[in-house]
Amino acid sequence: MKIKSQLIIFNLITRLLVILVFWLVLPILVQKVVYKKIDKSLVEKKQKFLEHLDKEEINDFILRNDTTETYASFSTLHSEFLQLSRKPTDFHQNKTVFVDEYRIIEGEQDNYRILRYQFLYEKTAYELEIGNSLGEIQDLTFIIKLFVLVVLIIILVVTFVMDTFYIEYLLKPFYKIIDTKIRRVNEPDTFDHTPINSTSSDFRELDTVLNQMMNRISELFKMEKQFIANVSHELLTPIALLQNKFENLIQNESLNDNAVDKIASSLRTLDMLKKVINNLLLISRIENHQYESNEKVNLQELLDDLCEDLTDRIDEKKIDLKMNLQHQFEFIGNKTLIHILLYNLMVNAIKYNKENGSIVVTDGFDETDYFLSISDTGIGMNENQVSHIFNRFTRINANEDGNGLGLAIVRSIALFHQIKIEVNSKLGEGTIFLLHFPVKENFY
Amino acid sequence: MNILIVEDNQELANEVRDFLSRNGYLCTLAKNCEQALDAFAGTDYDAMLLDLGLPDGDGFEVLKEVRKSKSKIAVIVITARGEIDDRVNGLELGADDYLTKPFALTELNARLFAVIRRLHGFVLNELEIHGFKLQLQDYKVSYQGNTISLTKKEFDIFQYLVLNKNRVITRLQLTEHIWGDVLELNSDSNFIDVHVRNLRKKLDKFVSIPWFETVRNVGYCINS
């Protein structure tokens, strides 16, 4: 997942958490604050009441001393009330209790916060209740909660959007670096050295380091290119000289058979040397990206040509070759290289096959790729051998001629064309080489 | 036939000259671009062997100059693998053929024969050896009016041996001529023997061919 998305998701989650916590805690907080305020005012009222106990009206009630009677007073809209009653039983002196209770005042039921206070006055126990309606406050709490929530959401959305844009802005150079400096670079020559603007020093540094690194690689690539050209000229010219000298020498009629044999054998050795050098040069040139890759390659045509060339070998071993290609697949790449790749695989399929064996070439499409399968009924390999076959100078069967470069070349060419190779082999039963050709980029 | 050999390695140039002289060509050597262009300006050559890596410049420069002139000279470019896309460039600039270094002298001989034949408008269409006529246009061989049906490979082998008659041709040279310069190591194979055997059988039907020699362990030779 991209950093950008990760940051955005993280942002979103933390913000949602904040809202959730606030939503859970807010009612408790509001209630606490409101109750504190109400309780305080109720206590003040109680104080005031007790101070005015000797006032006539209340006094009347107290003096009347009637157990059933209650003194009550309430505001017009029933938001507050005050009630004084005798309380002979269950008496706790000077105890103040706060409760939430429903009361009916003049037929109207409402929830009240009530202060209950029991006290002795002139040897009689009284209970004082002062209530404050909660209905209004609950409405208010609800509105406050809603308001706070809306404000919170607005703030969160605004900051979230701002954060997202800022992250995007901050990371833009980073993605540009990835896109232009890393992903689109196949070879050092196409590398874009223009510095990327960024306000963050980290990205500037990354860019600088990448540029430096690429310069070094570029330098190495150039050196290798030069080296390859030098090797080609400096090694192949003496070989050419020797070869031509031997070729002229062998025509000398005064030579005896033994000498002719030796010259012919020297020519073969020279030829081997030439081929090893040419093979290594081929691998180097492929890895140095000295080949174009823009030709249309028709695999079926290529394979048909190839098998034509290999007829002698196929016939010699009486191999039954089955070409079962179903698709006219065209691939964009380097025809010469693809030819070498298929040639080497086919030659191996023949070379390591048994007499009267068979080779089956099939193709098809799996989910994403076009695949070509070359399977033989040869000597096969065990897992350990399979893991080494693509290394240079590896030979499975020491009895067979070869320089152990054929499959190393196959791997280089496959890598160059982004062809995936899969090898399935069973010792004594045969080997299947599966080539997966990328489809999307090449169909146009 | 006049041939201009442009090659900076003196020894190699000498070997090529020795070989070509024995085949009846008149050779001139040039060590660098300058000498090559001087020689080209002074004499009318039929063909030029042009090595690309020259001390005073790129062989392609010589090729460009040569193609600017009216001369119809046949040019065979000689490259070492690794010099980038020589082949494509060479053919685009008007080289008639190319050979990769190292090459077999007999192969050079065959290529020279082909480009010069083309240069002269395919006037020469027949090779003859001991009464066998090789018709180069349609890959047919006849003996005293009887057509011998050969495969393409058999014809190519026959022609190659005839062009390089009186020389021992190694299996390797024949193999490379028939199957090309494959990168595989064991190209010195016996497959060529099968084709040669078939060819000799077909020729032997008409007349005994003691001139078609097998050089044990080495290769073949056709004597004139």
Image: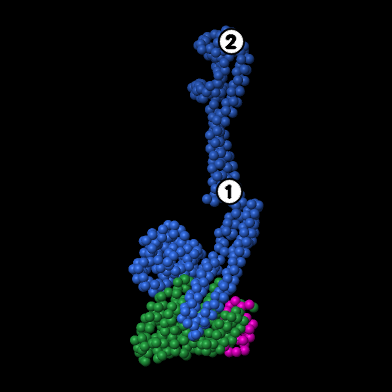
The residue singled out by tag 1 in the image is A164
* Relative vertical location of residue A391 with respect to residue B33 in this rendering, above or below: above
The quadrant of the picture occupied by the N terminus of chain B is bottom right
Q: Residues within 10 Å of mark 2 (few under 14, many from 20)?
A: few
Chain A, chosen colour in render = blue
Classify mark 2: helix, strand or loop.
Answer: strand
> Is A334 on the left-hand or right-hand side of A231?
left
| Distance from Cα at disc 2 to Cα at disc 1 | 70 Å
Image point 36% across, 64% down: which residue? A377
* Relative vertical location of residue A333 with respect to residue A27 in this rendering, above or below: below
Q: Looking at the picture, do discs 2 and 1 lie on one chain?
A: yes
The residue singled out by tag 2 in the image is A121
Residue range (magenta) = B32-55
Give x and y (percent) for residue A363.
39, 64
The question of residue B33 being in magenta is answered with yes
Give x and y (percent) for residue B36.
61, 83
Q: Looking at this view, is A6 or A295 the one in front? A: A295
Give x and y (percent) for residue B209.
38, 87
Give x and y (percent) for residue A415.
50, 63
Q: How is the image coloured?
A: by chain
> Is A71 on the left-hand or right-hand side of A432?
right
Image point 62% across, 81% down: which residue? B31
Task: Label the green chain with its letter.
Answer: B
Query: What amino acid is found at the position of numbered circle 1 in the picture?
Result: Thr
Image point 62% across, 64% down: which residue? A219
Give the chain of mark 2. A
